[in-house]
Amino acid sequence: MLMRTDPFRDLDRLADQVFGTAARPVAMPMDAYRSGEDVVIHLDLPGVDPGSIDLDVERNVLTVRAERRTPVPENAEQIVAERSSGRFSRQVFLGDTLSTDRISAAYDAGVLTIRIPVAERAKPRKIQISGGSDTARQISG
């Protein structure tokens, strides 16, 4: 259903742990699963203004963009800076079995939840089979 798009993510994560993240924000942590007729994606975006979140779908690529601004006033002397700020983006390649024209999204408590319905053509269906006795039987498929 979903394909991971960043083969270097583990290397980036290791580099962030070793060298810190002050220069560049880390990727948005993500969980994804299928629940009934939907694929559900949760992206952690704590401290992000909902108005800065942008979702785009082009072909089968879902792009999420967001911005977290630093809460430190311009005149203040920053003592510790461990929380990343700036612009983030993440792309998720969606399989052909998902209905990209019916995507919905909600942002609550710092988590962006995206629901993508499974396309009708990808759902299980019954197929009629005719046998040698001219009576049709149903087989679950």
Image: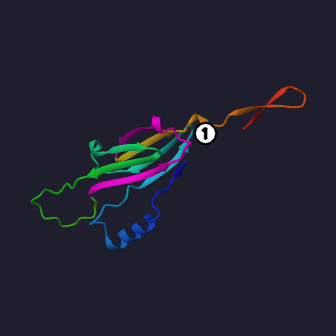
Q: What residue is shown at x 36% (from left), y 74% (from top)?
A: 18
Residue type at mark 1 is Ala
Residue hosting label 1: 122
Give the camera-side residue of 50 and 135: 135
Extent of the magenta region: 85-109
Q: Is residue 139 above or below residue 24?
A: above
Q: Secondary structure at mark 1?
A: helix
Between residue 15 and residue 57, name the one nearer to us. Answer: 57
Residue lying farthest to the left in this orientation: 75
Residue at (33, 49) in percent of width and height: 65
Quadrant in which residue 16 is drawn: bottom left
Residue projecting furthest to the right = 133
Residue 12, image x and y in percent?
Answer: 40, 67
Q: Indicate the position of residue 33 as horizontal and vertical percent values.
A: 53, 47
Residue at point 36% right, 42% down? 107
Whether residue 86 appears in magenta in the rendering, the answer is yes
Of residues 55 and 83, the one drawn nearer to the viewer in this rendering: 55
Quadrant of the image containing the C terminus: top right
Is 106 part of what is drawn in magenta? Answer: yes
Question: Where in the figure is residue 122, as x and y percent of width and height?
Answer: 61, 39
Q: Identify which residue is drawn at 9% across, 60% down.
A: 75
Q: Residue furthest bottom?
A: 18
Give the answer, above or below, for where 48 lies relative to 99: below
Q: Position of residue 132 (x, y in %)?
A: 90, 31
- Asked if residue 72 lies left or right of residue 98, the reply is left
